[in-house]
Amino acid sequence: MVDKNLLLYLPFDDPDGSKAYDYSAGRHDATLSDGAELTKIAKTGKALALNGGECITAQAIPFSSDFTVCAYVKIATTRLGWLLNLPGVENYCEQWLDVAPEMWYFIAFVRSGSTFKVFLNSECVYVGTFSGTPTGLSLSTDELLTTTASVDELQVFNVAKTEKQILKMQADTDVEYYIDGVNFKDYGVYVSASDGLVGRLARKEALTVDYDNYHGVVRDRKRKRFKEREITLQCFIEASSRSAFVEWQSRFFALFDGDGTHRLTVEYDGKAKPLVYEVDLLDEAAVDKKWGTYNNELMVGKFTLKLTEDEPVKKVLRHISGSNNSKATIKVSTYKLLNIYWGDGTHTYNVGGNDTTVEHTYALPGQYDIVVTGVIEDIEKFETNAILIWELLK
């Protein structure tokens, strides 16, 4: 679901070093300049290293109403300062905070009416009031000439988040598993271990020639191709009674019974860069359980879910829109055919050719992850108006 109160979300995990994608519905992507770059030294994934440069987006903080601005920051010195500029001459609020150099801190600024709060990690470090409409908000270090600060997971909301919500945004979360957008936990199913989600795929057998008057064999090592991906999830299911147990496990397995493939999404470190697979359940999934002594007793059963991804090499994109009938566009040049799974249960097969443009209309607003499968390595040109999450995932 698209958060309608989220005005800007820059996770800085993008493959393109000159652009930072906005994961909010507004899509106010930011541009990097003058030395600013995306670095892998991050709180999660990549981060923005300013290096004296700039990261500019068209989205402004809604100073005339309630707002929340939050991000992870890391600086090279021991003093982190902020300033809220107010109308008039020499009218502002400011604070300098003692921090450890090269450590990540979560900082949040919250305006609720005339009250302004600042949170550093799990602590509220400032509460004050003001009148009028603020004109600017800045973060500073005590470096003299420029800043080498890094920023990660920047978010701007047009509402005042509560302290509980602020704490939740920075809390470590479980790995979440979804099938066709439904969280496993909604059916009382939890994943205790997984195998095959990441790692090198097995290669297909290459052309091999065995000359009887030579040692060994001659093997074709060009254009390596890979076998399907096998994913194994060790699961357990909890239910409040015997009858609920039978109902919940039946309803969960029925999620895999529809036509076509099913979308497995794994959020392992936030929502911006999930692992995404188009899978099918081909094997049985026998549940190992013991019936409860009484019908209203907690029941737990264990089972292994073996999923197969027939097309394991892919690009993953994201289309975000807050309006009806929005369009995702892909323009591609490739002599190998591609399949596109649009993330709303529909697909377009056998896409290829020179400068071929494919459009897809989403009837409802929302967030949709698009999977493009095929011989991704041989694509000659690829352009899209969607966010590029994974340039090559296999």
Image: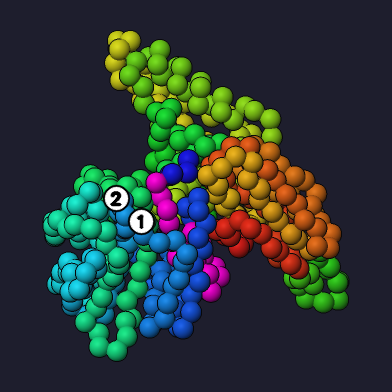
Q: Is residue 247 magenta?
A: no
Give the residue at the far bottom of this rendering. Answer: 145
Amino acid at circle 1:
Pro
Query: Looking at the image, what colour scheme do you see?
Result: rainbow
Give the residue at the far front of this rendering. Answer: 88
Mark 2 Cα-neighbour bin, 10 Å: few <14, some 14–19, many ≥20 = some
- Horizontal and vertical percent position of residue 116: 19, 56
- Horizontal and vertical percent position of residue 316: 60, 54
**Residue nearer the viewer, 51 or 376:** 51
Could you give the CA–CA distance between mark 2 and mark 1, rounded to whole angstroms?
Answer: 7 Å
Q: Which residue is mark 2?
A: 66
Magenta range is 5-22
Query: Measured along the vertical axis of the image, is residue 358 above or below residue 18?
Result: above
- Horizontal and vertical percent position of residue 289: 40, 23
- Can residue 81 be seen at all in this image of the molecule? yes
Residue 186 occupies which quadrant of the picture?
A: top left
Tell me: 138 left or right of 79: right
Q: How many marks?
A: 2
Mark 1 Cα-neighbour bin, 10 Å: few <14, some 14–19, many ≥20 = some
Q: Residue at x 36, y 59 (%)?
A: 61
